[in-house]
Image: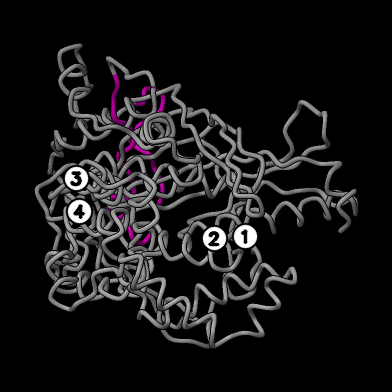
């Protein structure tokens, strides 16, 4: 498809995101929510829907919903209720789900996202509207096994452990236009729930799952096209790829005169395409009615005020503060604030006297590389404390050691910790900052490379890098970089 053809259309995208809360017990009973428990061990008559049982709302679920609603700048309903959503799935033992329909706990919020240009790294901001947020219970989990029959499976097993685990469903306005925007929106939601401490947001464990609603329309047309849902996206890359594929699929169908059918589709990772799953249900298909076993929820101002006091500094606010207070670029502010623990570590390093630039560079480069190569670790588990990193950065900036020496002792600091200053002194790695000693070393290097010296003085000034490298090699990286460059410049241009 040509770019010109694509630009005649625009995509209209909205996300329905299910966030699994990290409460110790389920939403309406006291069963554990532990993810790793053996199948069908975290169950009871309430979450299995046995006759005569009564659900009781977990107060922490309500508190988490209000926290998220406040963080999304939404309107918290002073009066809301639960409803029964009727449908049959093998992993839903009651044949209905307790959810919220016409009176959700939160409405009319917004979320600021940042879009990074992959080429320039420039960051642009966009506000995405939040239609609603409501509480509900999760269904169980089907495990398909075997091969050679329907969809490659010969039989299915069901695990009811997840039945009744508390969920927040967050529905966006159709304000998204690209796969990249949708993926960033989902990532920002994950940052938010992690900052709030209400969910781990692990997509690989199903703690955060997204359903994408997408349609296309000619540019300038006000009416939306026919909406297609892509179900259960469980990675940010899948969200982006599925949307990009579906945009092309729908545009091609329209150009060929085919009708777009309102349906639910699945993203097939292996073939990198969406496939039809079923026709899309409407709200009337679910036959909602008020949940008779749960009383309505009444929220007062005192509750809201108490919960609002527990909110931390949120990701968007932290990014803005990093730019204003620390003078960081929008990109660096974004990287450092992506994880709450990394942001806290960075702030602690700066509070211990390190420069903002030095702290940012070491954390986003060397420490990030170490954590990436050790996926079982996080920044709170490394032996290098913020105080130690601040000491290391100050040693470099004071000229006591070079950056090269700092990188040499970094692995030991990351794995064993200790005082950088004491390690440097014990290993004899203190920088050579005696001008006479450096002058002698530089004279020897120039004498050993007369051809390079002649080429430099003939105009090949890039050879200065060669001489700097020779100095560092001769001193095992211990030469004071600033002083060595100063002396070298004098001798090269003398």
Side (left or right) of 285 relative to 251: left
* Dot in front, 1 or 3: 3
Q: Residue at x 35, y 69 (%)?
A: 436
How far is the residue under mark 3 from the one under mark 4? Answer: 8 Å
Side (left or right) of 52 relative to 282: left
Which element type, helix, strand or loop, lies under badge 4? helix
Q: Are marks 2 and 1 in contact (CB under 8 Å)?
A: yes
Q: Residue at x 69, y 78 (%)?
A: 454
Q: Which mark is residue 184?
A: none
Residue at the spot of label 4? 386
Viewer-closest of 66 and 95: 66
How far is the residue under mark 2 from the one under mark 1? Answer: 6 Å
Which element type, helix, strand or loop, lies under badge 2? helix
Q: Picture coordinates of residue 99 (x, y %)?
A: 33, 37
Mark 1 Cα-neighbour bin, 10 Å: few <14, some 14–19, many ≥20? some
220 in relation to 164, above or below: above
Q: Quadrant of the N terminus?
A: bottom right
Mark 3 Cα-neighbour bin, 10 Å: few <14, some 14–19, many ≥20? some
Residue at the spot of label 2? 237
45 in relation to 54, above or below: below
Span of residues in magenta? 80-104
Residue at the spot of label 3? 352
Which element type, helix, strand or loop, lies under badge 1? helix
How far is the residue under mark 4 from the one under mark 1? Answer: 38 Å
Quadrant in which residue 68 is drawn: top left
- Going from N to C along the chain, the mark reached first, 4 or 2, is 2
Residue at the spot of label 1? 241
Dominant secondary structure of the residues highlighted in magenta in the image = loop
- Going from N to C along the chain, the mark reached first, 4 or 1, is 1
Which element type, helix, strand or loop, lies under badge 3? loop
């Amino acid at each position: 498809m040509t770019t010109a053809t694509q630009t005649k259309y625009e995509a209209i995208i909205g996300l329905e995101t299910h966030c699994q809360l990290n409460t110790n017990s389920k939403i309406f009973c006291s069963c554990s929510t532990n993810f790793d428990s053996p199948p069908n061990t975290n169950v009871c008559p309430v979450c299995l829907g046995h006759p005569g049982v009564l659900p009781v709302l977990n107060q922490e679920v309500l508190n988490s919903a209000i926290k998220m609603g406040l963080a999304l700048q939404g309107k918290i309903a002073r009066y809301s209720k639960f409803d029964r959503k009727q449908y049959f799935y093998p992993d839903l033992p009651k044949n209905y789900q307790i959810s919220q329909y016409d009176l959700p706990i939160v409405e009319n919020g917004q979320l600021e996202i940042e879009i990074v240009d992959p080429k320039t790294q420039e960051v642009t901001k966009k506000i995405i509207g939040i239609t609603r947020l409501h509480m509900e219970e999760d269904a169980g989990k089907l495990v398909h096994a075997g091969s050679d029959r329907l969809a490659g499976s010969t039989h299915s097993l069901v695990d009811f452990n997840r039945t009744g685990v508390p969920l927040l469903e967050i529905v966006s306005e159709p304000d998204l236009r690209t796969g990249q925007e949708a993926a960033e929106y989902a990532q920002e939601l994950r940052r938010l729930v992690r900052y709030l401490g209400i969910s781990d947001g692990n997509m690989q464990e199903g703690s955060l799952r997204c359903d994408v609603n997408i349609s296309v329309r000619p540019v300038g047309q006000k009416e939306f096209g026919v909406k297609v849902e892509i179900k259960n996206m469980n990675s940010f890359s899948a969200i982006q790829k599925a949307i990009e594929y579906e945009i092309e699929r729908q545009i091609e169908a329209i150009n060929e005169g085919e009708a777009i059918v309102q349906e639910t589709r699945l993203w097939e990772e292996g073939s990198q395409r969406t496939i039809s799953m079923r026709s899309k249900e409407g709200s009337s298909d679910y036959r909602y009615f008020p949940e008779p076993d749960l009383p309505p929820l009444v929220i007062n101002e005192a509750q809201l005020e108490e919960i609002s006091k527990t909110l931390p500094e949120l990701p968007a606010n932290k990014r803005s503060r990093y730019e204003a207070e620390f003078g960081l670029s929008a990109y660096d502010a974004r990287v450092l604030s992506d994880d709450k623990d990394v942001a806290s570590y960075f702030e602690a390093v700066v509070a211990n006297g390190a420069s903002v630039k030095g702290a940012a560079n070491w954390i986003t480069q060397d420490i990030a590389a170490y954590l990436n190569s050790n996926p079982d670790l996080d920044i709170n588990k490394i032996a290098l404390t913020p105080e130690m990193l601040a000491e290391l950065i100050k040693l470099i900036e004071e000229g006591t050691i070079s950056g090269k020496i700092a990188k040499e002792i970094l692995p030991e600091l990351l794995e064993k910790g200790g005082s950088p200053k004491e390690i440097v002194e014990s290993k004899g790695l203190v920088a050579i900052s005696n001008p006479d000693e450096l002058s002698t070393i530089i004279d020897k290097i120039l004498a050993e490379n007369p051809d390079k010296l002649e080429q430099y003085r003939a105009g090949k000034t890039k050879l200065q890098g060669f001489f700097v490298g020779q100095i560092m090699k001769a001193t095992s990286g211990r030469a004071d970089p600033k002083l060595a460059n100063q002396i070298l410049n004098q001798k090269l241009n003398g």
